[in-house]
Amino acid sequence: EQKSKLMKGLENFVTLSYSFGFIKEGISAVTGFADEMAGATAKVQQMSNELQSANEIQNLIMQSAQRSGSSYTDMVDTVSRFSAMNDIFGSNNEAIAFTGLMNKGLSANGVSKDAQSQIINQLAQSMSTGTMGVEDIQLMSQYIPDLSSGLQEYMNNIKGVEGNLQGMAAQGIITAEDIKNAMFMSSGQIEES
């Protein structure tokens, strides 16, 4: 009987320890989520101006994230990067629309969330430099073919540049503004995807 009580006490201790482990993991997850949301809120507040309140921007980003199947915090990260490119994006709305289309194009082509994040980061980084390289064009061709075909059409028909996208990128003639304009020109195709 003494041994039975000892075993029962040991079992209770193990169960309690196990439960505390789950509680600790849960607290860590909640804390991590709270930190992520606080960071997103701070970015949205930085984007607000006399034309749009942080609340309006937050709602627009949330709606776009839902339409494109993206996470809200990832969307805020990307939109804040594009909004900071004042010479390319004229407003928060333009940055939100661009990001939503890019996310939707990637999702429509079956790109995983992790890969989407990496691709968007690379394209955003390249766009911040002003020109797109051959690697960027290859990424777009592979993962966002609607944008790639729209960019080809835009460069040939609107800008009057002959040749293929890789050749244009190698010459450094494809700008971030071209990518933005081609994205909006391709929006119908991307939305239908």
Image (tube, rainbow, N blue to C red):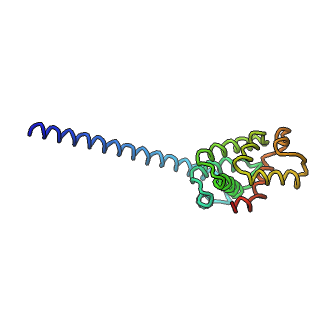
Q: Quadrant of the N terminus?
A: top left
Q: Residue at left 85%, top 43%?
A: 168
The foreground one among 151 and 79 is 151
State left or right for residue 63 relative to residue 13.
Answer: right
State left or right for residue 96 relative to residue 23.
Answer: right
Residue 69: image quadrant is bottom right
Please state the total of marks drawn on the protein image: 0
Q: Quadrant of the C terminus?
A: bottom right
x, y percentage for residue 33? 48, 48
x, y percentage for residue 52? 65, 60
x, y percentage for residue 36? 52, 47
Q: Residue at left 26%, top 43%?
A: 15
x, y percentage for residue 23? 35, 46
Name the outermost residue toward the left.
Answer: 1
